[in-house]
Amino acid sequence: MKKIFLLSAVMASIFLSTLNASAADNAQKGFMAPGSYHNMKKPMSEADRKAEMEKRKAELDRRLGVTEEQKAQLKTIHEKAKNEIAPKIKELTEVEHEISVLEKQSQNKERYNINTLQNVQLSGKSLEQLRSEQRSLKDEIHKIKKSQFEESQKIFTEAQRKELEKMRKEHEHQARKPEFGQRPPMPPRY
């Protein structure tokens, strides 16, 4: 009996090592992504993110033929929206933090029967009130962004708007393509 068990263990280890070696060999040849099947993009640094945004902005300006006057108008619209959104983002962040604290407190009380995060200063609002406030803040931010978009669209000529729509569709199509080594997106379930 011991011999059979030992023989089975040796055979299993040989089988698993050949699978591992085969997968590593295929990864080196480019047949499959190295490591996990679900390779994710590495997070970009702030400098890389800014460089990417500048690159996109330059491409947008080049393809649309944006004039200096249009750039100035767009900058004014952007700055106005940014100044309106900033305090709402600050408030939203505080509300979301409080929601997180309350959820964690509730979870720890239910699971472990302990009181945690007692020193965190809270507003005293209920979870439902905070979630309602969160929704309304998100709606307000969305309205400001929508208004900014609509104002900026008025600045462009008809030809520029058509080119912009074409670029949006290209970007949408590109965003739907799966990266090498990732699964394609699942179709929606009905």
Image (cartoon, helix red, strand yellow):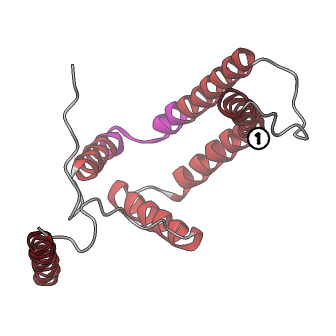
> Which segment did they paint magenta?
149-162
For the residue carrying disc 1, how many other residues have a C-alpha within 10 Å: few (<14), some (14-19), or many (20+)? few
**Does the segment drawn in magenta span residue 160?**
yes
Reading the image, the residue beneath label 1 is: 90
User: On the picture, is 56 further left or further right than 22?
Assistant: right
Image height of 170 relative to 29, above or below: above
Which quadrant does the C terminus fall into? top left
Q: Is residue 148 at all visible to an observer of this figure?
A: yes
Q: Amino acid at mark 1?
A: Lys
Q: Position of residue 20 (x, y in %)?
A: 17, 76
Q: Can the viewer see residue 30 in this picture? A: no
Query: How many marks overall?
Result: 1
What residue is rendered at 20% in x and 64% in y? 180
Depth check, front residue: 175 or 112? 112
- Quick one: quadrant of the N terminus? bottom left
Q: Residue at point 76% right, 40% down?
A: 90
